[in-house]
Image (cartoon, rainbow, N blue to C red):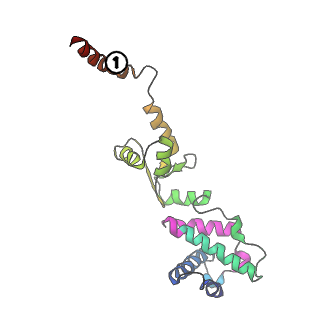
């Protein structure tokens, strides 16, 4: 493949093998008749978006991003050779962000909530809660924060973060017992000092 030969000087052999595998894997989804039957005219942004969304299910983030990068590089090569006018990948949504990708993941992983419920990473959940990842993991283990399994790891629904924050909210006057304890502990040393 001339495109891979073109990249050979810029990339490690293992990356070239992965790019070829990613390109062929997505190409198989573009044409049921086989990779050899894919025509440039059929490589529209919508066709590529659908194929990439289907292909990314069950794959890790690195693999998904590499496939997107491989196809983008392939189109840049085609454009530089004058075989296409523009890079169709410029109109393809980044991996994991398209509604089609989310729908395919929900069908493959039924535990994933519907699209109205935003899934965020545990890192983002910690940021929103103002705690570290160790606390987020403890909240998950104690079943205080539900999590969902999906193709790229585990996620937390934004609505569940909001519910946890609401349950944790201290009402006005809710710390009176702490103020009383602090006041009495300060008074005790003063009383001892006067008695001497």
Residue at horizontal 47 percent and vertical 41 percent from the top: 130
Q: Which residues are magenta?
A: 38-63
Q: Nearer the viewer, residue 36 or 122?
A: 122
Looking at this view, name the residue that lies furthest to the left.
Answer: 196
Residue 155 image position (x, y, % from top left) = 47, 52
* Residue closest to the eye, 29 or 161: 161
Of residue 101 and residue 37, the one placed in the foreground of this image is 101
Helix, strand or loop for the magenta stretch, by majority: helix
The N terminus - image quarter: bottom right
Residue 92 or residue 47, whichever sits in front:
92
Count of marks placed on residues: 1
Is 40 covered by the magenta stretch?
Answer: yes
Residue 11, magenta (yes or no): no
List the residue tagged with mark 1: 183
Give the x, y percent position of residue 108. Answer: 49, 60
Which structural element holds mark 1? Answer: helix
Name the residue at 70% across, 76% down: 76
Is 96 displayed left or right of 60 in the figure? right
Q: Residue at x 45, y 23 (%)?
A: 171
Q: Position of residue 35 (x, y in %)?
A: 61, 82
Q: Quadrant of residue 98?
A: bottom right
Work out whether 125 lies above or below 179.
Answer: below
Mark 1 Cα-neighbour bin, 10 Å: few <14, some 14–19, many ≥20 = few
Q: Is residue 137 above or below residue 7?
A: above
73 left or right, relative to 192: right
Residue 189 image position (x, y, % from top left):
27, 19
Q: Residue at x 46, y 50 (%)?
A: 122
The C terminus, quarter of image: top left
- Which quadrant holds residue 104? bottom right
Horizontal placement of 137 versus 93: left or right? left
Taking the view exactly as shown, the residue that stands out farthest to the top is 195
103, above or below 67, in the image: above
């Amino acid at each position: 493949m001339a495109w891979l030969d073109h990249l050979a000087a810029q990339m490690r052999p293992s990356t070239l093998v992965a790019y070829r595998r990613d390109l062929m894997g997505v190409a198989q989804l573009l044409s049921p008749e086989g990779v050899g039957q894919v025509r440039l005219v059929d490589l529209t942004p919508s066709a590529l978006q659908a194929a990439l969304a289907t292909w990314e299910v069950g794959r890790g983030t690195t693999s998904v991003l590499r496939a997107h990068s491989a196809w983008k590089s392939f189109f840049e090569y085609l454009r530089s050779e004058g075989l296409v006018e523009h890079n169709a990948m410029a109109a393809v949504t980044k991996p994991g962000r398209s509604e089609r990708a989310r729908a395919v993941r929900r069908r493959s992983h039924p535990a994933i909530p519907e699209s109205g419920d935003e899934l965020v990473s545990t890192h983002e959940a910690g940021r929103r809660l103002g705690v570290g990842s160790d606390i987020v993991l403890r909240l998950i283990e104690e079943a205080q924060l539900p999590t969902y399994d999906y193709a790229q790891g585990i996620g937390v629904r934004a609505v569940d973060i909001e519910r946890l924050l609401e349950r944790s909210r201290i009402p006005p006057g809710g710390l009176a017992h702490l103020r009383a304890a602090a006041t009495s502990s300060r008074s005790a040393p003063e009383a001892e000092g006067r008695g001497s």
